[in-house]
Amino acid sequence: MTDPIEQDDARFGARLGATLRAAEPLPPGAEARLLATLAATPRPSRPLPWWRRPRTLRLSPIGGLALAAGFAGLMVLGTLGVTRETAPTVAAVAPDTVHLVRFVLVNPGARQVSLAGDFNGWQAEALTPAASGGVWSVALPLRAGRYEYAFVVDGERWIADPALPAARDEFGGVHSVLHLGADRVM
């Protein structure tokens, strides 16, 4: 059962809410007076800044063609410069290049995740959990080559990286193989 004071408060709140939610009609002619007042109010006149002022440009047909040809030439030269800079050059990669490899495992049920592989002597190193929860990651600098590794979940379960193909070792365990090189990352 509810307390009588609480019942009175609930009824008072319901009445007050109904009153506050009710539509308030405008007096007759209020909208017309408002529009007339807005129309009669002078707007402040500010000059437009120079970059927004309309301008008229007069060109002869030959001048227009010359302007269009110059613009097209700039676009072609700009495109050539960009493609030269972004073209991949595999030969420029040194064989001792260090790659920063981020190992990531998504496992929301894990309390602790470590990474073990031939790059750290198969000693499990703890991964850092992300703020979103369930995502564990670490970034390691590795040189070009072939690496084998596995994730260790909660200190006992070894699992392969779901992002790479799994391979079995001579002990029946499952691990992942990562190839780093100048021409491929797998």
Image: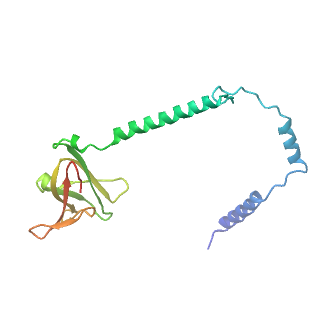
Identify which residue, 143 or 32, lies in the foreground: 143
Give the quadrant of residue 64: top right
Q: Residue furthest bottom?
A: 1
Q: Residue furthest right?
A: 28
Percent position of residue 6, x then y: 65, 65
Total label count? 0
Percent position of residue 99, x then y: 22, 46
Is 1 situated left or right of 42 in this image? Answer: left
Quarter occupied by the C terminus = bottom left
Quarter occupied by the N terminus = bottom right
Residue drawn where x is 57% and y is 31% of the image: 67
Residue drawn where x is 25% and y is 59% of the image: 112
Give the quadrant of residue 51: top right
Is 108 situated left or right of 25 in this image? Answer: left
Percent position of residue 98, x then y: 20, 44
Residue drawn where x is 65% and y is 30% of the image: 52
Q: As displayed, is residue 171 above or below residue 116?
A: below
Identify which residue, 132 or 99, lies in the foreground: 99
Identify which residue, 137 or 179, lies in the foreground: 179
Q: Residue furthest front?
A: 62
Is 164 situated left or right of 59 in this image? Answer: left
What colour scheme governs how the chains and residues are painted in the rendered image of this protein?
rainbow
Identify which residue, 142 or 33, lies in the foreground: 142
Percent position of residue 34, x then y: 85, 43
